[in-house]
Amino acid sequence: MPGYELGHPAPLGLRVADTLLDVYELDAWYGAAQVLRGVSLQVGRGEVVALMGRNGAGKSTTLKAIMGLVRRASSRLSFMGRPVERLRPFEMARLGVGYVPEDRRVFTELSVDENLSLGRLPRRAWPDGEPAANWTAAGLYELFPPLRPLRDRLAGTLSGGEQQMLTVARTLMGNPFLVLLDEPSEGVAPIVVEQMITMIHALKARGCSILLSEQNVPFARQVATRAYVLEKGAIRYSGAMAALLDDERLRRQYLTL
């Protein structure tokens, strides 16, 4: 599938029934400063999509705006066909949207096990009745083996990479249909990066969708099939990951530091 730059139609190849998240002309602000300008994107069921761009392009803000963590306005923002423009973050979570922030928020005075317990939400089913992925603490310790021997340790004593894994695992305890994953490879050891890649493939295999913000091109190309590129709060490219990485001009213009 070819890629498309701003100003051109971008057929995403998604049937309406396949579209899990539909964002059209999303704006967002920090105070009086507008950060996002007309961001439009879609994520399909069981799809991994990357938001790419340089630092300050608006990647993290896009995830926060979708989740309702910053002031936002849009022509359309829907999840599983339901309008969600007015929903607050906890209501988005109840619907099945998980959010993993970049800054590894854990409950430092609680154990790893206790952190996981706080993320637990009821089992879910897709609108067609098919059961959604049901994550348990035991299953997450299999997905993130380094956490297993740390289950009784206070989360505040973990390394940055271990806290990153715990933050993701706690989010998965909510059995989300969609995970908004902010810079999962940022500032962690290579072994943790490999764990994140394994985790993303495992989620996709279970039918979970992922929208991730990522500046690490080698990481993104291993997990995502489609990409959106942001610059100054606006989408500059939409299309296949392979087409983006094969286009040297686009890489230099939007991705090269």
Image (cartoon, rainbow, N blue to C red):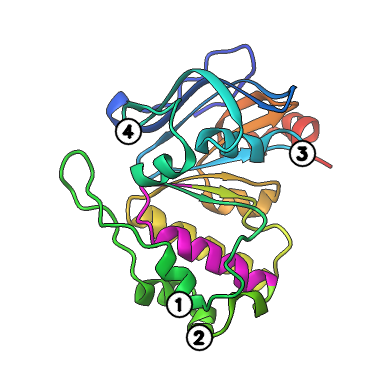
Q: Which residue is mark 1?
A: 113
* Of residues 84 and 131, the one drawn nearer to the viewer in this rendering: 84
Give the amino acid type for the residue marked by disc 2 in the picture. Asp
Give the CA distance from mark 2 to mark 3: 38 Å
Total number of numbered discs in the rendering: 4
Give the CA distance from mark 3 to mark 1: 36 Å
Q: Nearer the viewer, mark 2 or mark 3?
A: 2
Q: Nearer the viewer, mark 1 or mark 4?
A: 1
Give the CA distance from mark 1 to mark 4: 31 Å
Q: Which residue is mark 3?
A: 54
Q: Which residue is mark 2?
A: 152
Circle 1 — which element? helix
Q: Pointers 1 and 2 in contact (CB under 8 A)?
A: yes
Does 169 lie within the magenta span?
yes
For marks 2 and 4 on the same chain, the one whose residue lies earlier in the sequence:
4
Viewed as shown, does residue 53 lie left or right of 165? Answer: right
Q: Which residue is mark 4?
A: 80
Task: Please tell me the numbered disc located at residue 14.
Answer: none
Give the amino acid type for the residue marked by disc 1 in the picture. Asp
**Residue 124 percent across, percent down from the top left:** 25, 51
Give the CA distance from mark 1 to mark 2: 6 Å
For marks 3 and 1 on the same chain, the one whose residue lies earlier in the sequence:
3
Q: Using the image, determine if residue 132 lies above or below residue 30.
A: below
Circle 2 — which element? loop
Q: Pointers 2 and 3 in contact (CB under 8 A)?
A: no
Mark 3 neighbour class, 10 Å CA radius: few under 14, some 14 to 19, many 20 or more: some
